[in-house]
Amino acid sequence: MGAFNHLLKSLLELAQNRLELVAVELEEEKYRVVEAVFWTAIVSGLVLLALAMLTVTVIVLLWDSYRLVALVGFFILYAAAAGFGIATLKRRIRQTRPPFSESLNQFKKDREWLQGQS
C-alpha cells in the first residue's frame, strides 16, 4: 500500500506541475495576443493616415492634368498591397505553432516515462 500511495502522490505532483505549466503558457499567450492586437491597431491607424495624406497630396498636385490616372493608380496600388497583406497574414496563421505545445510535449514525455516504468 505504501508503494501505491507513493506512486499516486508522485502522479498528482506531476499532474500539478504540468497544469501549472499550462497556466503559465496560457497567461503568456494572453499577453502576447493583447500586445499584438494593440500594436497592430496603432500601426494600422498611423499607416492609414499617412497613406491618406500622401494620396490627397498627390491627387491635388495632379488635379489639373492627371487626376484620373492618379486615382486609378492609387486604387491599383492599395488593392495590390491589400492582397499582399492578406496572403502574408494567411501564411503567418498557418505557420504559427499550436498553443500549449510545450505542455503537450511534457505530457507526452510523462506518458512515455510511465509506460517505461510498467
Image (cartoon, grey):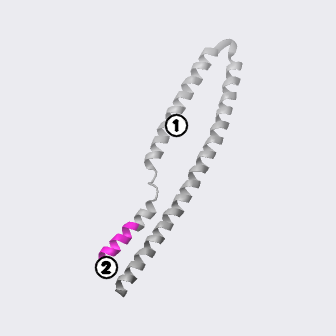
Q: Main secondary structure of the magenta part?
A: helix
Residue 28 lies in the magenta stretch: no
The percent position of residue 70, horizontal first and vertical second, equals 62, 19
Q: Which residue is mark 2?
A: 117
Q: Residue at x 68, y 17 (%)?
A: 62
Looking at the image, residue 39 lies above or below residue 113: above
Magenta part of the protein: which range?
107-118
Looking at the image, residue 2 lies above or below residue 31: below
Bin the neighbour count of mark 2 within 10 Å (Cα to Cα): few under 14, some 14-19, many 20 and up: few
Of all residues, the one furthest to the top in this rendering is: 64
Q: Residue at x 44, y 49 (%)?
A: 95
Mark 2 or 1, nearer chain start: 1
Bin the neighbour count of mark 1 within 10 Å (Cα to Cα): few under 14, some 14-19, many 20 and up: few
- Given residues 44 and 63, the one toward you in this image is 44
In the image, is 4 to the left or to the right of 79? left
**For the residue marked with disc 1, what is the amino acid?**
Gly
Residue 113 lies in the magenta stretch: yes
- Given residues 101 and 87, the one toward you in this image is 101
- Given residues 82 and 102, the one toward you in this image is 102
Q: SS for tag 2?
A: helix
- Disc nearest the viewer among 2 and 1: 2
Quarter assignment of residue 12: bottom left
Q: Residue at x 35, y 70 (%)?
A: 111
**For the residue marked with disc 2, what is the amino acid?**
Gln
- The circle drawn on residue 31 is none
Disc 2 and disc 1: Cα gap in Å? Answer: 51 Å
Q: Which residue is mark 1?
A: 85
The quarter of the image holding the C terminus is bottom left
